[in-house]
Image (cartoon, rainbow, N blue to C red):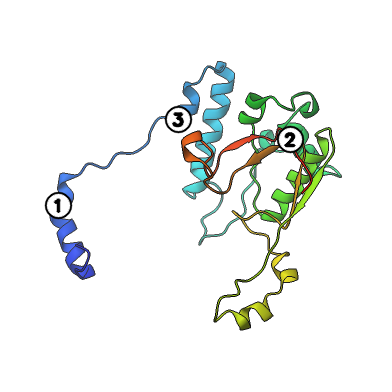
C-alpha cells in the first residue's frame, strides 16, 4: 500500500495481525560451541546479566539513565595504561600470533567512541613487528556547479580532520600482516565485500 494514508495501513495490519505468530530468540547459540562446562556457565551468567541491564532490572528504577555496579569478574583493574591492559587481556602474546587468523577471529574489543577505537588500533599496530607505512587521503569538495560556497567553507585541511565510523582517517597507517577491514564492495564474487576482514600481505609506496 505505497500511497495509502498511515491510518489505512494501521487498520489493514490490525485485520491480518492474528495470522502471524511472533517468534522470539530463546537459545544462546554461543553456549552450543565446544566449550567446557565452566566456560558455558560463565557465558550464560554474563548473557543473563546483560539482558537484565537492557531490561532495566539492574540497579534502581530510572527514567532512562542510571549508574550500575559492574561485577568484579568482568573488570580489568585500573592501571596507569588502561589501553595496554585491555589489549594485553584480550590479545595475550599478540606478537607471537601475528598472521594467525583464528586467533584474531576469536577476539574483539568493543569501544564506545571513535577516539578510543583509534587509540586501541594504534596500540595494537605498534605491537606488530615491521615497518609502518602511512597513506594520506586526497580530500576535496566536488567542483560541480553549486558547490562554490561549500568548497570555500570546507577546505582540504578541514576535510582531513574528519573522523567518523565507516570512513577511513586521513592518515591510514598499515603494516604487513596487520588486520584490515574493507569499507566498500570491491569484488563481491571474490568475497571482497564491505565488512570483510583480512591480513595485509604487502605495503608499498605510491
Residue 23 falls left or right of residue 41: left
Q: Residue 9, how many percent across, how many down? A: 20, 63
Q: Is residue 189 above or below residue 144?
A: above
Q: Residue 71, how many percent across, how many down? A: 65, 38
Give the quadrant of the N terminus: bottom left
> Which residue, given by chain and number where applicable, does mark 1 sit on?
16
Q: Is residue 84 above or below residue 43?
A: below
Q: Are marks 3 and 2 in contact (CB under 8 Å)?
A: no
Marks 1 and 2, how far apart at CA: 57 Å
Q: Residue 3, how many percent across, how many down? A: 21, 68
Q: Secondary structure at mark 1?
A: helix
- Mark toward the start of the polypeptide (1 vs 3): 1
The residue drawn where x is 54% and y is 39% is 192
- Which quadrant of the view contains residue 182? top right
> Which residue, given by chain and number where applicable, does mark 2 sit on?
202
> Callout 1 environment at 10 Å: few (<14), some (14 to 19), or many (20+)?
few
Marks 3 and 2, how far apart at CA: 39 Å
- Mark toward the start of the polypeptide (3 vs 2): 3
Q: Determine if residue 173 is in view.
A: yes
- Which quadrant of the view contains residue 93? top right
Q: Is residue 141 above or below residue 104?
A: below
> Which residue, given by chain and number where applicable, does mark 3 sit on?
28
Amino acid at each position: 500500500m505505497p500511497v495509502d494514508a498511515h491510518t489505512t495501513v494501521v487498520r489493514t495490519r490490525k485485520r491480518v495481525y492474528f495470522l502471524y505468530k511472533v517468534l522470539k530468540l530463546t537459545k544462546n547459540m554461543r553456549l552450543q560451541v565446544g566449550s567446557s562446562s565452566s566456560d558455558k556457565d560463565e557465558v550464560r551468567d554474563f548473557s543473563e546479566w546483560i539482558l537484565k541491564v537492557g531490561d532495566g532490572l539492574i540497579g534502581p528504577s530510572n527514567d532512562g539513565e542510571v549508574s550500575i555496579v559492574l561485577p568484579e569478574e568482568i573488570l580489568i583493574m585500573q592501571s596507569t595504561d588502561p589501553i595496554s591492559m585491555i589489549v594485553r587481556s584480550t590479545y595475550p602474546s599478540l606478537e607471537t600470533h601475528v598472521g594467525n587468523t583464528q586467533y584474531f577471529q576469536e577476539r574483539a574489543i568493543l569501544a564506545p567512541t571513535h577516539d578510543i577505537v583509534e587509540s586501541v588500533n594504534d596500540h595494537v599496530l605498534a605491537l606488530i613487528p615491521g615497518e609502518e607505512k602511512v597513506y594520506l587521503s586526497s580530500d576535496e569538495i566536488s567542483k560541480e556547479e553549486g558547490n562554490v560556497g561549500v568548497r570555500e567553507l570546507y577546505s582540504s585541511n578541514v576535510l582531513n580532520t574528519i573522523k567518523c565510523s565507516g570512513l577511513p582517517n586521513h592518515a591510514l597507517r598499515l603494516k604487513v600482516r596487520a588486520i584490515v577491514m574493507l569499507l566498500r564492495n570491491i569484488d563481491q564474487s571474490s568475497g571482497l565485500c564491505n565488512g570483510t576482514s583480512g591480513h595485509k600481505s604487502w605495503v608499498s609506496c605510491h
